Image: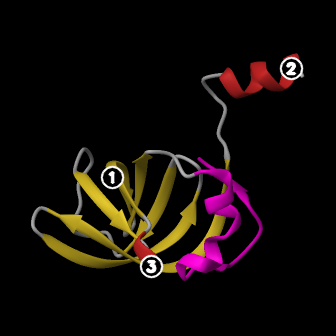
Amino acid sequence: MAQLIAEQESEHYRPLRLTVSCPGQLLLGARWVKVDVTSLSRDGATIANAGLVNVGDRIDLALRDGLQRSGIIRWVRRGEAGVDLRPSFAVPELESVRHFGCRLSGRPQPTD
């Protein structure tokens, strides 16, 4: 147990991500923009169609059925963006991603 705690507290620890495919919307300033969410973790998401965002932008990400989180864009590359979300998703929320219009599209992958 001590080893697990030490690994999770390490600066190199990256939680598993669910590779998904689900529609979402970003609130950029005063307008909502449609995006595709391609991965979810407890603290973040990867979004495609992210050509309008820049590192450091503050956004809101909305999924179906009212699930919404605020976040900050942490990286942008090749049409995708990584979002640090707050508050974190609860494990039960991630366990029921299909409820939010998401399809699992692969095995969980470590974040980069």
Q: Please say if the residues under marks 2 and 3 sit with CB atoms less than 8 Å apart.
A: no
| Residue drawn at 65 percent across, 68 percent down | 19
Q: Which residue is mark 2?
A: 3
The alpha-carbon separation of the residues under discs 2 and 1 comes to 32 Å
| Left or right side of 47 for 106 | right
The amino acid type of the residue labelled 1 equals Ser
- How is the rendered protein coloured? secondary structure
| Residue drawn at 62 percent across, 49 percent down | 111
Q: Which residue is mark 3?
A: 64
The secondary structure type at the circle numbered 3 is helix
The alpha-carbon separation of the residues under discs 2 and 3 comes to 38 Å
Name the N-terminal-most of marks 2 and 1: 2
Q: Which residue is mark 1?
A: 70
| Left or right side of 26 for 88 | right
| Picture quadrant of residue 54 | bottom left
Q: How many marks?
A: 3
Tell me where residue 64 appears, x and y as whole percent. Answer: 45, 79
Q: Dot 3, how many residues are within 10 Å of its Cα: few (below 14), some (14-19), or many (20+)?
A: some
Q: Which residues are magenta?
A: 90-112
